Amino acid sequence: MAEFTAKDVKALRDATGAGMMDAKKALTEADGDMEAAVQLLRERGLAKAADRSDRENNEGAIALAVDGNTAAIVQLRTETDFTAKSDGVANLVKELADVVLAKGEGAISERQSAIDDLKLTTKENLALGKVARIEAAPGNALDTYLHVQDGRGINAVVVEGRDVDPETLHEIALHIAFAKPIALTRDEVSADEAEREKAALLEITKAEGKPEAAWPKIVEGRIASWYKERVLLEQGVFGEKETVQQKIGKGEIVRFAQAYIGA
């Protein structure tokens, strides 16, 4: 019969977040071997976690790591803001961002066991969200922004520019945080999605009783507005008339990345 003490059960509970009876049962099955008991609980917990995978996880925390002309964003998704604000989530998301900054986006897989362990501890559908790393090309500039609320990052931006002055580039970073574009140019927007939108706008225009001869022009204007909501270079800076493209003049926004809670 396995030999272990109440102190062993408590230690296993503290290490895994398991209930007392589950911890005791795992130690019994593992013949008192703490490491084997931890693995048993992990396997059972991950199986239960799979059942939670369809639960909404629109909360979470975002970390931004920067070193010179390189920056990384990592998002962890949680079900509740209570969990999102916990030290466990805050520490792990920062650690993940540091790993991605140092080694690249693929390095996130090195910490999958830590993500799994936190999933077991929180008993939520905790999952990895946005992961991005941008290293500015020689001669280009990088700007970043992280909005922190209640001790957790909730909106992070990295933007790379060429021949854009630092003040303007930072303003563009703030604008991205505000406007949440999904693409830099129209070419990056799904052609299928755009065609579906055009078809829907045409039907709306017809239903409004507009003259048939005017349909193409009306739809063209409406699809342009639709693009403006999504395409960074076409957006008015902070909703004003001057577009991002006009703001940067002869400069260029090379690329950007953004993660925010709720997306």
Image (cartoon, helix red, strand yellow):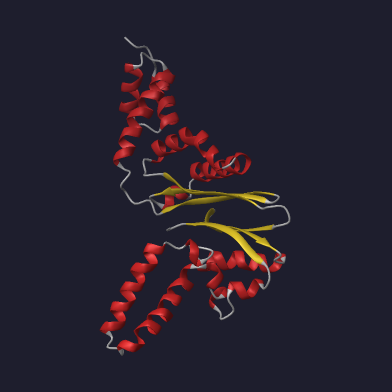
Compared with residue 95, is residue 8 higher up or lower down, i.e. above or below?
A: above
Q: Is residue 38 left or right of residue 90?
A: left
Quarter residue 218 falls in = bottom left
Residue 258 appears at what percent x and percent y?
53, 57
Compared with residue 186, is residue 206 higher up or lower down, i.e. above or below?
A: below
Q: Is residue 226 left or right of residue 47?
A: right
Residue 73 appears at what percent x and percent y?
56, 50
Residue at screen point 32% across, 29% down: 44
Between 90 and 102, which is closer to the camera in this rendering?
102
Residue at screen point 39% across, 51% down: 80
Between 122 and 170, which is closer to the camera in this rendering?
170
Picture quarter with the C terminus: bottom left
Residue 212 visible in this rendered orientation of the protein: yes
Q: Which residue is situated farthest in the front direction here?
A: 213
Residue at screen point 43% across, 50% down: 82
Residue 146 visible in this rendered orientation of the protein: no
Compared with residue 90, is residue 228 higher up or lower down, i.e. above or below?
A: below
